[in-house]
Image (cartoon, rainbow, N blue to C red):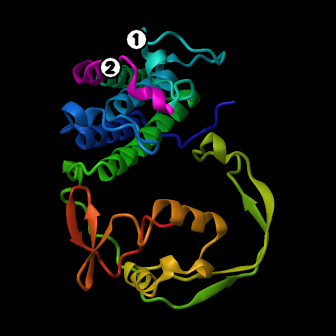
């Protein structure tokens, strides 16, 4: 069964598609040479592969999907063998005979043009409404992945983020709030809103009482924990966390660098002051 999404006009769907694509191209448009592949790491994909995968996913669900549940052939004969993430192991993605960047972008653009044409003709179809939205959200998630790939690999700040907003300032801490626990409905209920397949369906779970801070932990607060030796005190860590800390040799959050009496953080390929009142990131 195809889950219903928001019902959008053809103009709205077109805007969503073009906006997602604008961001994808902005985040990857300056990559060339070795940066299109990058080192083989467990936490990132080769950017060249990932661009093609975005095109493949959109084509598969917006153009190739049949009501029978089967799929028509791709406009690229090799697409399924190159970009199907459910069939291609992560480590194998660096060894694939990937098309050139020019050919990959042509595939990306060719798929989008066909989807836009289909939306113009058939936007009232429930399945197309859902799959277009799915492909947009999928592309936006890969936009996040392109960002963290650039951060991981010390690539320059993407041009799309040069005028981005500053990190939000966290209000002063106001202590914890007690959540009494009890029955909680987890998941999405059937209806008119878009849901991913792993959000289906709503069901009751029992939650034990717990307390949680009313505000996010700030960089400044977490720097106090680091400064007081929090990374060397076993009592503050779970067994799995402590084993990770020992294996990683971690003494502070990833990308933090001590500079005399202050902390800096690496942001893409630059070192910048750590904003004390922003929410701490890269901890879990």
For residue 6: magenta?
Answer: no
Nearer to me, 150 or 26: 150
Q: Quadrant of residue 44?
A: top left
Residue lying at 47% horizontally and 60% vertically, measured from the top left: 248
Residue position marked by numbered label 2 in the rendering: 107
Label 2 element class = helix
Q: Are marks 1 and 2 in contact (CB under 8 Å)?
A: yes
Q: Residues within 10 Å of mark 2 (few under 14, many from 20)?
A: many
Packing grade of label 1 (10 A; few <14, some 14-19, many >=20) is some
Residue 109, given in percent of the width and then of the height, sits at: 29, 24
- Residue 49 location, x and y as percent? 37, 29
Residue 216 seen in the figure? no
**Residue closest to the eye, 225 or 86:** 225
Q: Position of residue 162 (x, y in %)?
A: 18, 57
Q: Position of residue 210 (x, y in %)?
A: 71, 79
Q: Residue at x 66, y 67 (%)?
A: 239
What residue does disc 1 label? 75
Give the numbered dot on residue 198: none
Query: What is the number of callouts on the image?
Result: 2
Residue 266 visible? The answer is yes
- Judge by depth and name the residue closer to the eye, 12 or 233: 233
Lower sequence index among marks 1 and 2 = 1
Q: Residue at x 40, y 85 (%)?
A: 227
Magenta segment, which residues?
Answer: 90-106
**Residue at 39% over, 11% down:** 76
- The answer to whether residue 251 is above or below residue 276 is above
In terms of depth relative to the viewer, which is nearer, 255 or 276?
Answer: 255
Mark pair 1, 2: CA separation: 8 Å
């Amino acid at each position: 069964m195809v889950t219903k999404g928001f019902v959008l006009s053809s103009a709205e769907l077109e805007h969503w598609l073009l906006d997602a694509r604008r961001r994808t191209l902005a985040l990857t448009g300056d990559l060339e040479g070795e940066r299109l592949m990058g080192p083989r790491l467990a936490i990132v994909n080769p950017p060249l592969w990932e661009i093609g995968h975005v095109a493949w996913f959109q084509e598969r669900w917006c153009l190739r999907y049949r009501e029978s549940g089967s799929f028509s052939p791709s406009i690229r004969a090799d697409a399924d063998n190159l970009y199907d993430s459910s069939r291609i192991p992560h480590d194998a993605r660096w060894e694939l005979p990937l098309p050139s960047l020019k050919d990959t972008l042509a595939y990306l653009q060719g798929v989008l043009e066909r989807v836009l044409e289909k939306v113009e003709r058939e936007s009232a179809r429930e399945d197309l409404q859902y799959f277009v939205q799915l492909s947009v959200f999928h592309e936006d998630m890969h936009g996040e992945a392109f960002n963290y790939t650039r951060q991981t690999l010390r690539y320059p700040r993407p041009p799309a983020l040069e005028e981005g907003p500053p990190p939000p300032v966290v209000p002063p801490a106001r202590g914890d709030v007690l959540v009494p626990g009890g029955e909680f409905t987890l998941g999405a209920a059937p209806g008119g809103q878009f849901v991913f397949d792993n959000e289906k369906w709503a069901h009751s779970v029992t939650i034990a009482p717990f307390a949680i801070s009313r505000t996010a932990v700030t960089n400044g607060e977490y720097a106090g924990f680091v400064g007081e030796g929090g990374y060397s005190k076993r009592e503050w860590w779970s067994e799995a966390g402590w084993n990770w800390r020992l294996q990683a040799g971690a003494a502070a959050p990833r990308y933090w660098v001590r500079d005399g009496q202050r902390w800096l953080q690496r942001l893409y390929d630059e070192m910048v002051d750590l904003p004390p009142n922003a929410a701490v990131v890269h901890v879990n």
